[in-house]
Image (spheres, grey):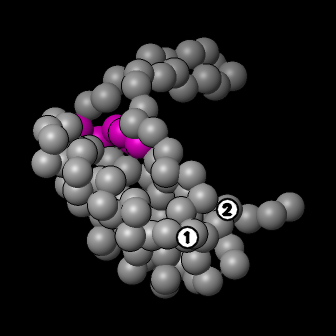
Amino acid sequence: MKKFVFLYYGFESPTQEIKDAWSNWFASLGDKMVDSGNPLGTGREITHNGTKELSLDKGAITGYSIINAESIDEAEEIAKGCPFITSVRVYEAVSM
């Protein structure tokens, strides 16, 4: 089993309906869910040239989750069931 990181971009204001949809989706994943994650707040990008403040604008990463799947194809199918997200990026967490 491999681990995959889901990075969520954009979401709607968390009404009760949205919270319930998230809870139901997470529950449906059972033991495939490693870490349901959290929403993200403001952040900073740090480079050798300095630091830049990051805000939660429309294109920002707004949250993450970590799941178990056999392949990136399976992870993609799981991501397609995610409610109320503008975009989900799926990355394999590679063991070193």
Q: Position of residue 73 (x, y in %)?
A: 49, 84
Whether residue 60 appears in magenta in the rendering, the answer is: yes
Q: Position of residue 75 (x, y in %)?
A: 49, 75
Give the camera-side residue of 58 and 74.
Answer: 74
Q: Is residue 39 left or right of residue 13?
A: right
Give the camera-side residue of 28 and 74.
Answer: 28
The residue identified by callout 1 is: 32
Residue at horizontal 41%, vertical 42%? Answer: 63
Q: Is residue 30 left or right of residue 41?
A: right
* Quarter of the rendering containing residue 2: bottom right
Residue that extends furthest to the right in the rendered view of this protein? 96
Q: Position of residue 76 (x, y in %)?
A: 42, 76
- Rendered position, 81 above or below 41: below
Give the camera-side residue of 40 and 16.
Answer: 16
- Rendered position, 85 above or below 94: above
Q: Is residue 80 left or right of residue 68?
A: left
The answer to whether mark 2 and mark 1 are in CB contact below 8 A is no
- Rendered position, 56 above or below 87: above
Residue at horizontal 64%, vertical 25%? Answer: 47
Whether residue 85 appears in magenta in the rendering, the answer is: no
* Quarter of the rendering containing residue 77: bottom left
Q: Is residue 87 left or right of residue 66?
A: left
Q: Position of residue 96 (x, y in %)?
A: 86, 61
CA separation in Å, label 2 and label 1: 14 Å
Tell me where the magenta segment starts and ends, as one range: 58-63
The residue identified by callout 2 is: 93
Q: For mark 1, does the 10 Å Cα neighbourhood hold few (<14), some (14 to 19), or many (20 or more) residues?
A: some
Residue at horizontal 33%, vertical 63%? Answer: 25
Dot placed on the residue nearer the N-terminal end, 2 or 1:
1
